[in-house]
Amino acid sequence: MTDQIILVMLSEAGGVGKTTIAVNVAYEWSLRGRSVTIIDLDNNHSLDAFVGLKPERDPRQTTARIFDRDFDGSWPLKSIFGSELISVCQGCRGLKEVGESLVLRKRREYALDKILKAYPLDCELIILDCRAGFDLLTENALAASTDILIPVDMGVKARTVSSLVNIIWQEFEELELSPSPRMMGLIPNHYNKDAAFHEDFIEALTRISQQLDIKLYPPLRTWQYLNNSAILGKPLKIIRSGDRMNSIFAGIVDDLEKIKEN
């Protein structure tokens, strides 16, 4: 699909909420009658738990399969949450070996982009859920993406956010991406309004987002119901439809719809 959005979740650290945001944004998108696929590029099975799936032991039924040289476009997708509009391509332990094998390929950073163009998914939005850091699979995700969302944990130092954004911009140049993916914004996670240093962090992050000309989304607070949604393998909106935090995910989807319409 030529107007397909490919959104990558990027961070340098684990546990910052990439999968939480990916699942809740995908679900909100599907509620608006739009199709979405989450591709898991991590090997820790965290997405499986978040969507209520058992880990897939057969690598041929996971993301590892699409990187095989004989891949024929038969995507190993599974529908989730009882909807045909939302599906996942599960990750597996074998993705570590996939990353290592890509090193031997020509134009190795563009393998995923080539796969998605040769065998396009029939959906309006693809979300690439990456592992932390910048390994070869993450570089593949970046090269294939149209848009980037950066979750930020309240425990990091504010200046590391600027450093991360600069690293991403450098990746744009090194990968010679044209056009470059859009920076959708920063989204703070694990926010506690009663912690004074969290307020200081938000103020610093606001200044940084203004300097970098990147949108800053409202922070996701530390909230038991959000934790419960991950444990239960369901989006927050299913277990607590009226929760105010759902409006943050809805705001991200509003922006994605604007991108698609434009």
Image: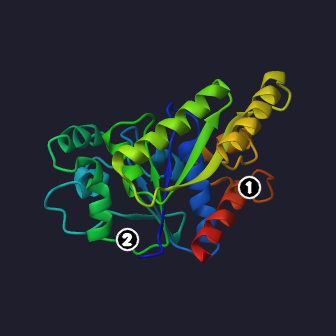
Q: Is residue 109 left or right of residue 40?
A: left
The three-letter code of the residue at mark 1 reads Asn
Q: Residue at x 48, y 43 (%)?
A: 169
Q: Is residue 35 visible to the viewer in this orientation of the structure? A: yes
Q: Is residue 43 left or right of residue 179?
A: left
Q: Residue at x 45, y 61 (%)?
A: 179
Who is closer to the viewer here, 190 or 110?
Answer: 110
Quarter residue 261 falls in: bottom right
Image location of residue 37, percent across then percent down: 45, 64
Who is closer to the viewer here, 70 or 201?
Answer: 201
Q: Residue at x 28, y 54 (%)?
A: 110
Give the secondary structure at mark 2. Answer: loop
Position of 141 relative to 211 (above/below):
below
Quarter residue 1 falls in: bottom left
Q: Is residue 109 left or right of residue 87?
A: left
Compute the Cα span from label 1 to label 2. Answer: 27 Å
Residue ID for mark 1? 246
Mark sitting on residue 22: none
- Of pointers 1 and 2, the one earlier in the residue sequence: 2
Who is closer to the viewer here, 164 or 87?
Answer: 164
Image location of residue 203, percent across then percent down: 80, 33
The three-letter code of the residue at mark 2 reads Leu
Quarter residue 219 falls in: top right
Who is closer to the viewer here, 154 or 103?
Answer: 103
Position of 210 relative to 6 (above/below):
above
Image location of residue 155, percent across then percent down: 66, 25
Mark sitting on residue 121: 2
Q: Residues within 10 Å of mark 2 (few under 14, many from 20)?
A: some
Q: Is residue 234 visible to the viewer in this orientation of the structure? A: no
Q: Residue at x 24, y 50 (%)?
A: 59
